[in-house]
Amino acid sequence: MAEKILLSSPHMGGTELDYINDAFNKNWIAPLGENVNNFESSVKQYTGSKAALALSSGTAAIHLALIEAEVKEDDIVFCSSLTFSASANPILYQKATPVFIDSEEDTWNMCPKALKKAFEKYESLGKKVKAVVAVNLYGQSAKYDEIVEICQKHDAVLVEDAAESLGSEYLGKKSGTFGDLGIFSFNGNKIITTSGGGMLISNDEEKIKHALFLSTQAREKALHYQHEEMGYNYRLSNISAGIGIGQMEVLDDRVNRRREIFNIYKESLKDIEGVNFQPEIEYSKSNRWLTALTIDSIDTYDLINYLGQHNIEARPVWKPMHLQPVFKDYDYISLNEDVSKGLFERGVCLPSGSNLTNKEVYFVCDTIKEYFKAL
Ligand SMILES: *Cc1c(COP(=O)(O)O)cnc(C)c1O
């Protein structure tokens, strides 16, 4: 293959430029305008959430979610360990203390039993837990029927990091709507992109209104510049939002294509020993943002390097936060076994972009099979 087969690259639908041109024609080259409003409406309509706020990144959305959850200095925040660092960094922005929670094998996401154990531990220490950041890895929803109940019981605000799971479902509800606050990312590698952007959603319209205020420098209503709270410059531009509207029009196609690619991999690689694909639990539909699997029988780095030599970009599964030097001083709660560490050590993500051709996906499968044959 001449062209490098990428893990997940942007895939435009075709109408994005029309919305950008519209912004140019009206000279709305600003972080406000029709495209921003329409992009928010589109996400509200799609998810069924009452309020939505378009932001410059998913990370900014998590940061504002934690502020709206009133997370402050020295507060405890529970967070999935197996995730991208952007789930956890905003906890440090707030000078709060992250405590990492292990995954379960069923979903690869936050283990409800470990979460319960963590609440019990911190309550016995007399410490209040302000918020929980739960992640939906590679599109698969966490078990929110259990997680929501645990958070409510302990009076903690649930932030659903749905950066990777826009278009996924669980128990008949759209991903992102299980938390008190939910976030999406439109970074270049996500299922849809605005070249960079994010969204904060909630049914609590007051919280979203306040987050909007903070995201636009916390300017009080006055002719002069009056500030009573610390603000941020986190709003999405009207140009980027134009891309977002076009991308929302094709979101369901993107989900279907990523699921198709997953099925090709699953069918083609089923005879390789020790291969297990990330499960899709009952009553859930994953957008299969990335096809992720574990392989028991080999050194996964060796396979990833081999694919690289054949112009194929594959990656390990996220390295858990409790194994990251930047978070080494923080607590980690798991049951008997370190599940997220095992998933990291055995996990591989395969090229999954919705713009890959079947020929390219089969080439990846054949290259993997060649690797195993040569062992
Ligand atoms: C991509 C991602 C984010 C961050 O989103 P950005 O838009 O890149 O800031 C947060 N959490 C998870 C799980 C992600 O995959």
Image (cartoon, rainbow, N blue to C red):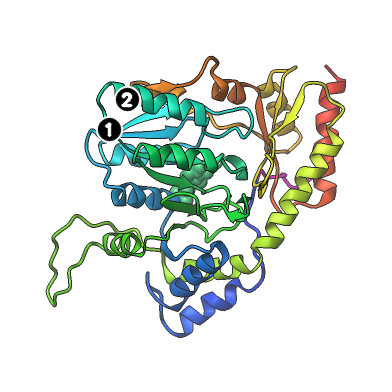
The boundaries of the magenta stretch are 2-7
Neighbours of disc 1 within 10 Å: few (<14), some (14-19), many (20+): some
Label drawn at residue 128: 1
- The three-letter amino acid code for the residue at tag 2 is Tyr
In the rendered image, residue 3 lying in the magenta stretch gets the answer: yes
Query: 160 or 245, which is in the foreground?
Result: 160
Neighbours of disc 2 within 10 Å: few (<14), some (14-19), many (20+): some
What residue is at 42 percent from the left and 34 percent from the top?
A: 79
- The three-letter amino acid code for the residue at tag 1 is Lys
Looking at the rendered structure, the secondary structure element under dot 2 is helix
Looking at the rendered structure, the secondary structure element under dot 1 is loop
In the rendered image, residue 316 lying in the magenta stretch gets the answer: no
Give coordinates of residue 197: x percent, y percent: 46, 57
Residue 239 left/right relative to 355? left
Q: Are marks 1 and 2 in contact (CB under 8 Å)?
A: yes
Residue 276 left/right relative to 196? right
What residue is at 40 percent from the left and 37 percent from the top?
A: 88
What residue is at 83 percent from the left and 40 percent from the top?
A: 363
Q: Main secondary structure of the magenta part?
A: loop
Give coordinates of residue 93: x percent, y percent: 29, 41
Label drawn at residue 122: 2
Query: 334 or 250, which is in the foreground?
Result: 334
